[in-house]
């Protein structure tokens, strides 16, 4: 561990650093594989501990598994994303709950007035929901990889998804993530470059 | 490792799962400690590999380190957050670059027209920048912990930060993260509950 620390500046081992970030790839093609609800629950039970502002925890997840549900989802997607969704073992629709404040009695027991802070301000609540759910989505991508799964997030337009799946719950979809039990190393495209630290950071 | 997999459904060991998520806590008080730019660069070199849509990678980071810069930042913060920022060894202002498309020649070499997709649509570009930078912020919180650091994210209002620090770069701040070399286990408040998987997930 000390050696790893000296070599990379990290407190986690190289295999884990590779698994979570360095060699993990976005999956775009899928071999036949199973992803169980138990695996997804294990991922959630890990990443639910990631921090959100005031512990609002607005992330919600639609697990699209049956052929019928998959077809409904495919029909809402832009054409370029349809094949991936059609072929992924499981696809997650990540959403936020604009009514997350109704759970703050459970989530924020140390601050009894938490619900009321958000109840009267729909715009502030929507912003807090989307912002914190996106942070949680970052945790979830890492968490899927921590469970040995491969994640294929696809940003796009989600109005069709909300109408098709969330008319009753009021959830708002913001990211579709294909999930596979097979790691994404077989993706067709060479890895794209990243910007260097001194290109993205200013120190003052 | 097999035993861990069976017990938790995870492919990472328990110490790492604890470090990254399960026992990691948001830091709100700080012992004297050093956080070096080398450590922050190591964190970035890990999490830069996390996926963003089309590899747009819009996250930018202001590292606030000197007493003078810290005072300028404190002056922009709401009163309830000032003490933490004043006392943290280092504070990161996470921002996105609305002009991220100017780097897509480097980031998206496999798609030569990528810059032009975003160049003409400021609203779509701002949405892509904020959305993907927030995903990257989730990776960054995990990455700080992977480097043995503690993270204290604080969501709030950032207009003052943009005026004070980003007038020239045009970056837009969206999250302030205090960073400490001391893990956050000494935080004063008991850990708040989380929602269970079957409360946040629907399977269809």
Image (tube, coloured by chain):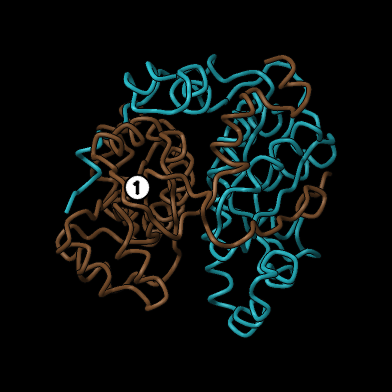
Chain colours: A cyan, B brown
- Residue A80 visible: no
Label 1 is found on which chain of the structure?
Answer: B
Name the foreground residue: A2 vs B123.
A2
Q: Secondary structure at mark 1?
A: strand
Quarter of the image containing the N terminus of chain B? top right
Quarter of the image containing the C terminus of chain B? top right
Q: Measured from the top left, where is residue A49 in percent x and y? A: 63, 48
Name the foreground residue: A185 vs A197.
A197
Going by the image, does A105 lie left or right of B50?
Answer: right
Which residue: 69% across, 22% down?
A: A181
Quadrant in which residue B190 is drawn: bottom right
Q: Is residue B178 above or below residue B144?
A: below
- Residue B39 visible: yes
Which residue: 72% across, 21% down?
A: B5
Q: Is residue A20 above or below residue B121?
A: above
Name the foreground residue: A69 vs B113.
A69
Q: Is residue B56 above or below residue A2?
A: below
């Amino acid at each position: 561990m000390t050696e790893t620390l000296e070599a990379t500046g990290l407190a986690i081992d190289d295999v884990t650093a590779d698994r979570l970030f360095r060699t993990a790839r976005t999956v775009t093609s899928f071999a036949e594989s199973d992803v169980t609800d138990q695996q997804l629950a294990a991922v959630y039970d890990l990443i639910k501990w990631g921090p959100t502002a005031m512990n609002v925890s607005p992330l919600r997840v639609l697990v699209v598994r049956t052929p019928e549900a998959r077809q409904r989802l495919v029909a809402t997607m832009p054409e370029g994303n349809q094949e991936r969704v059609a072929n992924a073992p499981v696809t997650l629709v990540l959403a936020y709950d604009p009514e997350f404040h109704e759970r703050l009695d459970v989530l924020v027991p140390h601050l009894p007035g938490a619900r009321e802070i958000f109840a009267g301000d729909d715009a502030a609540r929507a912003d807090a929901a989307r912002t914190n759910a996106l942070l949680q989505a970052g945790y979830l991508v890492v968490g899927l990889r921590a469970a040995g799964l491969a994640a294929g997030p696809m940003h796009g337009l989600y109005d069709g998804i909300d109408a098709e799946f969330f008319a009753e719950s009021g959830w708002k979809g913001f990211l579709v993530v294909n999930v596979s039990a097979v790691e994404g190393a077989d993706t067709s495209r060479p890895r794209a470059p990243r910007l260097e630290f001194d290109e993205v950071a200013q120190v003052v």
